[in-house]
Amino acid sequence: MTERQRGTTIYRPVIYGNTSVLITPENRGNAPVDHTHRWTVALRSAASPLDGKGDTIGGADDISYFVKRVTFKLHETYPSPNRNIEKPPFEVTETGWGEFDIQIRVTFVNESNEKPISFHHHLKLHSWTAGSLPPGSDPSTLPPPEGPINAWQYDEIVFSDPTQNFLNILLAHPPTPLPKVKRKAAPPHIAYPPSLVTTRNMPEFSAAMEKEEADRLDNAKREIVEQTDKLRKLLIEKEKELERLKKEAESQGEPKS
C-alpha cells in the first residue's frame, strides 16, 4: 500500500519556537556564570490543551505518529550542537546569553516516504528587538521582564499525494482543532515587534487568530494590486509623455523649406 493517492492533500498544524526565562540565583543550577537565560525550543502540535490551562503553548497532540525525529541545530559553541530528538516532547532546553538562528529539521516516519523538511527560528531571549530600541539606548538598562518571553510561529505541514499507508495513519489521528475564539493572548513573534510582550499567562493559537492573519494577508494582497495598478497607469502616462516629447524634438529639428 505504498501507492500514492493522487489528488489527495492533507495537512497537520504545528507550531515551532521558544520560551525563555531569566536565570535567577535560585534557579541557576549548573548553568555557567555568564549565562543569563534558560530557554526551550520546540516543535509541537498547534492546539494547546483543551482545558486552556497550564504553562505550555501548543502540544495538545502527540505528533510522533507522523514525526520520527526532530533535529535542532544550535549555535556551534554548544557541545554537540546537532540535537536529535526521537521521541516526544520534541524539544531542547539549554541556557545561554545570546540570540541566534536555530534550524529545525523534521524527519517523518518511514511509512510516509516523505523527504525531511526544515524550519528556521530565531531564538528569542529579550522583549526588545534592535529596531524597537531608541537610538543610543542601552538594552542592559531596561527593566527585566516579569514573566517568560515567547516567540512562536504557526505553520501547516502539507502532504500532497500521500501513500495509502501514511494516509491511513494520518486519518486515524485527527488533530485537535484550534479554539474558535481567543481564550488567551495571541503568541508573540519577532515578525510583529509590538507583540513581543511578557505575560504571566501563556498565550495560544486560535482559529480566530488564524482568520485574522488570513484577513491581513488578503488586505496586503489587495494593497499590492492597487499599488501595482497605480504604478502601471503612471508608467503608461510617462511613456506617452516621452513619446510626445520625442515627436516635438523631431519636428523642431526638421529643416525649414
Image (spheres, rainbow, N blue to C red):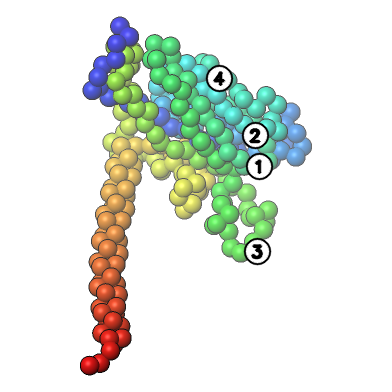
Closer mark to the observer between disc 2 and disc 3: 2
Q: CA gap, disc 4 to disc 3?
A: 42 Å
What amino acid does circle 4 point to? Answer: Ile
Residue 69 left/right relative to 39? left
Q: How many marks?
A: 4
What residue lies at 32% left-to-right and 32% top-to-bottom?
A: 178
> For residue 98, which numbered disc appears in the image?
1
Please provide percent x and percent y for residue 223: 29, 57
Q: Residue furthest bottom?
A: 257
Q: Quadrant of the N terminus?
A: top left
| Position above or below: 21 against 45 | below
Residue 80 left/right relative to 177? right
Nearer the observer, 208 or 7:
7
What amino acid does circle 1 point to? Answer: Gly
Query: Which residue is under mark 4?
Result: 85
Q: Quadrant of the C terminus?
A: bottom left
Q: CA gap, disc 1 to disc 3?
A: 20 Å
Q: CA gap, disc 4 to disc 2?
A: 17 Å
What amino acid does circle 3 point to? Answer: Gly
Closer mark to the observer between disc 4 and disc 2: 2
Closer mark to the observer between disc 2 and disc 1: 2
Please provide percent x and percent y for residue 18: 53, 35
Query: Which residue is under mark 3?
Result: 136
Earlier in the chain: of badge 2 and badge 3, it is 2
Please provide percent x and percent y for residue 173: 33, 16
Mark 2 and mark 3 residues within 8 Å of each other at the beta carbon: no
> For residue 138, which numbered disc appears in the image?
none
Earlier in the chain: of badge 4 and badge 1, it is 4
What residue lies at 38% left-to-right and 28% top-to-bottom?
A: 157
